[in-house]
Image: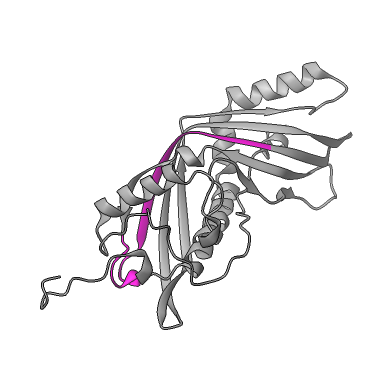
Amino acid sequence: MKQLYVLTWLCLYAYIPDVGSGADLPADVDKCRFGDSECILSSINALIKRYPQGIPQIGLPRLDTYRFPDTSILDSPQRGPIWLNFRMRDNVHRGFNNATVTHVEGFLRQPNQKQIVLKAHLPRLLHEATYDQVGRFLLFAINTTGRLQSDFQNFSLTLTIKVIEEYRNNKRYLKVYSLVPKIDLDRWIIWLEDLYKENMDVTIAVNQIFNENWLEFWNELQPGLIKSFTTAFTTLLNRVFQNVAYDDMFLPDLDIRSGL
């Protein structure tokens, strides 16, 4: 029974409208020298705080209400005594605007010289969606639609990123070719409405099992979640990187001869 209901939660596939290349950072975003991790960390945190509704012209989505496309969590072959398909739609995430970047590495003059590492912490990440569940457990058919709510508390995320350079219009642009996320959290609270429409007591009991054993369920979900975060943040970063030239993100190199 546990295997049947461990399949709840989210996939992050970032939806960001198409925008053209060659965009500039807003004038109030502080630029730093290449590799100045302390300055870069401060600048990213200021940007997050200043632009909770995103920056559409550079491809950065809303951070206060972050919407993702429909996602298939499990797509099992429809045969045998036990199988389940679980899909989520109308996905909304709230809380990325409260993220604090705690660590930055990389962003050197030659960006592929060292991998980029970003670490961030969110007090809470809230997720709401509509789920569709179809399957079979022995003699019992499953066909359920309802609302899903998740509360991820003390949510920490580490992204380890490798990039390559692309040249357009005599400028350098980055493209992510490898991104590995690591996720940690202190608590996961989940509620799935209408698991058993004909019996509210069973719905409450199953949700109680989820929350009493949340760590076990979370650990079993890790492979799918890691894949989802990989796709989501690769999409997000590539959309920003394709619009803002890498050199335009930073201050010009120091010219020792001129003293500048």
Residue at the (18%, 71%) spot, across then down: 254
Q: Quadrant of residue 143?
A: top right
Residue at the (27%, 65%) spot, across then down: 34
Residue lying farthest to the front in this orientation: 27
Q: Quadrant of residue 173?
A: bottom left
76 vs 46, nearest the viewer = 46
Relative to residue 260, is residue 233 drawn left or right?
right
Q: Say above or below: 36 vs 192.
A: below
88 vs 201, nearest the viewer = 88
Q: Say above or below: 90 vs 115.
A: above
Q: Say whether residue 243 is visible.
A: yes
Q: Say whether residue 157 is visible.
A: no
Q: Quadrant of residue 245?
A: bottom left
- Colour scheme employed for the rendering of this structure: one colour
Q: Quadrant of the C terminus?
A: bottom left
Relative to residue 130, is residue 176 drawn left or right?
left
Residue lying farthest to the top in this orientation: 201
The magenta span reads 106-128
x, y (%) of residue 170? 41, 83
Count all numbered tags in the image, as a single digit.
Answer: 0
x, y (%) of residue 104? 32, 52
